[in-house]
Image (cartoon, coloured by chain):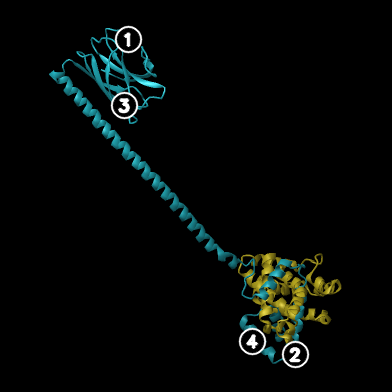
Amino acid sequence: MIDERTEELASARVLGTLSAEEAQLFDRQAQDDAELRALVAQLRGVTSLLAGTSAALQPSAQRRAELLRQLDHPDAAPANDAPAGRGWLPWALAAGFAMLCLLLGWQTSVLRGRLQAEQHRADELNRLVDTLRLESADLRQSVLTLQQSNRLANMRIAMLASQLHADPQAVAVSVWDNERQSGVMVVRHLKPPPKNKDYQLWIIDPGYPSPVAAGLLQVDPNGNGRVEFKATRPIQSANQFAVTEEAKGGVAVPTLTALVLAGA
Amino acid sequence: MRRISARERPAFLEFYDRYAPLLLSVAARVLGNRPEAEDVLQEVCTQIWRSPEGYDAALGTLGGWAVTLTRNKAIDRVRATSRHRRLIEEVATSAESDQSAATSANELLYGKERAARVRVALNTLSLEQRQVIELAFFAGLSQTEIASRLEQPLGTVKARIRRGMLKLREELGDML
């Protein structure tokens, strides 16, 4: 005969409301009491029918397949198991980070190379500027020296500066011996003319209405040249010198819009 | 169960196909979340396959044991979340409503006639008896917690549970 207190415990046991300790004590008691075990079995059947009042759901075929896979491979995690899904994530992040590092390293290397190239070019330009400055200073000094020399008192010495925005480094020195009616011009850093053009020298003498032609000027690929020249007319006073870019072979009257070098 | 213990796969599949809808339905009712309920079903079935020695035929049927395992796992999960309070509210009010409109797991398992008998048996209980039983089973409340919630003496709660369960056993005796 089961008393009310035990029936309460049995009911509580199958409904899952006993604490772990209470449940353990009750199970121990039931082990030695067949009648009590039968009551528990019946009450558990009641809870099973009670559970069956829940709205019916059918498990998906996918879950069934997953379960069968798990039975065959007990150590295998289910396909949708979250921890397994997270397992590859650190590796993916690490791989992504490594790729990013490689990319940044490559970009840094490329940029460093470009920077070095630009620095090299800047150094070359600075050296060129220094060279030009020194050469220009040397030429000026030479001109002043010659002008002050009594020995060259009859000579007209002029420095011609570039008239080209695109070629500002071009420079020339002209020495005109009025007694001999001949001169010498030295030019530096003047780009060679186009193939169908020539550089032409001109002497500006106030005794003539237009410049007097004094021959053609050749420059090497580096823009350097030296020419001994004579005027096509007698020169009384060589006030200025000029170089223009003209048609191949030269012209009788200069194209002033093509002025390359000029100076007095 | 003996065949499952002997690792007979067809026997296990037979068990699964028969009881999985019931177990999933219970887990879903507790958790209110189908994917989680499917996870619980998977855990329970795996446990039964790997540790069948936990089953004691003297304490009930295999289906009854599986239901208990499922209910306990689902309750453990829902207790760990903020949904437990909502579940208690739902269970407390569901006892007052007629849920016969939906197809029950009992219908799938035993057929309409027997499922109807279970509903009739439940209707023989008083509202108070049904409420305390469902709060204990589906919401996972202890008898003390039920007493506190319903503002009833603990003894009253215990008595209602006992009388309600014995009444159901009496009504459904030939199905147990």
Q: Are marks 4 and 3 on the same chain?
A: yes
Image: A44 above or below A116: below
The answer to whether A247 appears left or right of A70 in the picture is left
Disc 4 from disc 1: Cα separation: 132 Å
The answer to whether B60 appears left or right of A165 in the picture is right
Residue, far right: B113
Disc 2 from disc 3: Cα separation: 122 Å
Tell me the residue that label 3 is attached to.
A170
The residue lying toward the viewer, choosing from B63 and A261, is A261
- Amino acid type at mark 2: Glu
Tell me the residue that label 4 is attached to.
A25
Disc 2 from disc 4: Cα separation: 17 Å
Q: Are marks 2 and 3 on the same chain?
A: yes
The residue lying toward the viewer, choosing from B146 and B84, is B84
Q: Which residue occupies 72% across, 74% down?
A: B132
Badge 3 marks a residue whose secondary structure is: loop
**What colour denotes chain A?**
cyan
Tell me the residue that label 1 is attached to.
A210
Q: Nearer the viewer, mark 4 or mark 1?
A: 1
Q: Are marks 2 and 4 in contact (CB under 8 Å)?
A: no
Q: Residues within 10 Å of mark 3 (few under 14, many from 20)?
A: many
**Chain (yellow):** B
Label 2 or label 3, whichever comes before in sequence order: 2
Tell me the residue that label 2 is attached to.
A35
The answer to whether A203 appears left or right of B112 in the picture is left
Residue B143 lies, in percent from the top left, at 67, 77
Residue A201 sits in quarter: top left
